[in-house]
Amino acid sequence: MEHVRFKNRTWDIAADLRLPKDFDTTKKYPAIICAHPISSCKEQTSGAIYAERLTDQGYVTLAFDASHQGESGGEPRYLEDPPTRVEDFRCAVDYLVTLDYVDEDRIGALGVCGGGGYAANATMTEHRIKALVTVVAANYGRLMREGNLTPDAALGMLEAVGKQRTAEARGEEAVITTYIPNTQEEREAASITDVDITQAIDYYKTPRGANPNSPNKLRLSGLSAAVGWDAFHLAELLLTQPLQIIVGDVPGAFGSYRDGFELFDRARSEKKDLLVVKGASHYDLYDQPFAVDQAFEKITPFFKDNL
């Protein structure tokens, strides 16, 4: 594995480039861009699980930290900005096509959770990506709107964000909040029982998946960009590449189960498939062998056939 950097606008994107066993610089290899979930980083599921396994299968893989997050550059920090995260994919392709050993006609993408939603959106307008896999893809815009329970609650949040931006423009400090409670005790105190939130804490805040590049920090003044964004907008017109969608059948608050079906229905792709992993939750498909193994029963032949 090599730690590499490539540009998005004026800042560097930090990435882990994995090369297959018995790598030969004189050969041409298919390459797969691996995108991490919202609040995550390249060292977690996108890199350590999916990129690692794809590399074992003979692919060059590139797992990167989103702009404004992890080891990547971009100011301000802790920003979750959908258009910029989509641009990260285009810049990742720009980097891959400069590598002599990458076959530019055999570049794919795989995204997990929010990274899957971003990957779908990027693939619509980045047709150098020839095949797409989404794993428990979540539409961050939909989640931001419906996660507030009612449209009026979302409107109230936009009012609060506007006031915070005004305060920051006048010199006040930024407010940094969290994606999830930091402990199960915080979750219980807030009377949250949802399976996705419960398992998110288990993944991100314990040795199972914790990483310093995934600090559970979110900039409040940046939230408005996602509220009016739809990861699947124009999928029925522009998403034509082969598509493999993978979800678990244990639904939770993040909505990846329903988002998977929506993406399948909306995608224009003539070649598309949806796998529902029985008994798997959103976070089981991050790293649990029984779920990941079933996912790869589809992923392996899919990329073999389409890259």
Image: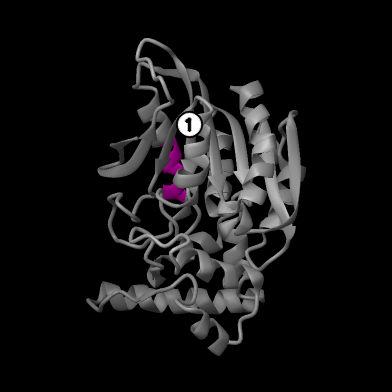
Amino acid type of the residue that numbered disc 1 sits on in the rendered structure: Thr
- Identified at 46% across, 49% down, the residue is 83
Image quarter of the N terminus: top left
Q: Is label 1 in a helix, a strand or a loop?
A: helix
Q: Above or below — where is 188 with respect to 209?
A: below
Q: What residue sits right under mark 1 in the picture?
A: 55
Callout 1: 10 Å neighbours few (<14), some, many (20+)?
many
* Farthest-out residue, left: 171
Q: Nearer the viewer, residue 124 or 198?
A: 198
Q: Is residue 234 visible?
A: no
Residue 114 colored magenta? Answer: no
In magenta, the rendered stretch is 83-90
Left/right of residue 13 with respect to residue 31 in the rendered view: left
> Is 279 positioned to the left or the right of 143 in the image?
right
Residue at left offset 35%, top offset 63%:
78
Label tally: 1
Against 200, residue 307 (above or below) is above
Q: Position of residue 207 (x, y in %)?
A: 43, 64
**Which image quadrant for residue 301?**
top right
Q: Is residue 9 above or below residue 230?
A: above
User: What colour scheme was applied to this rendering of the protein?
Assistant: one colour
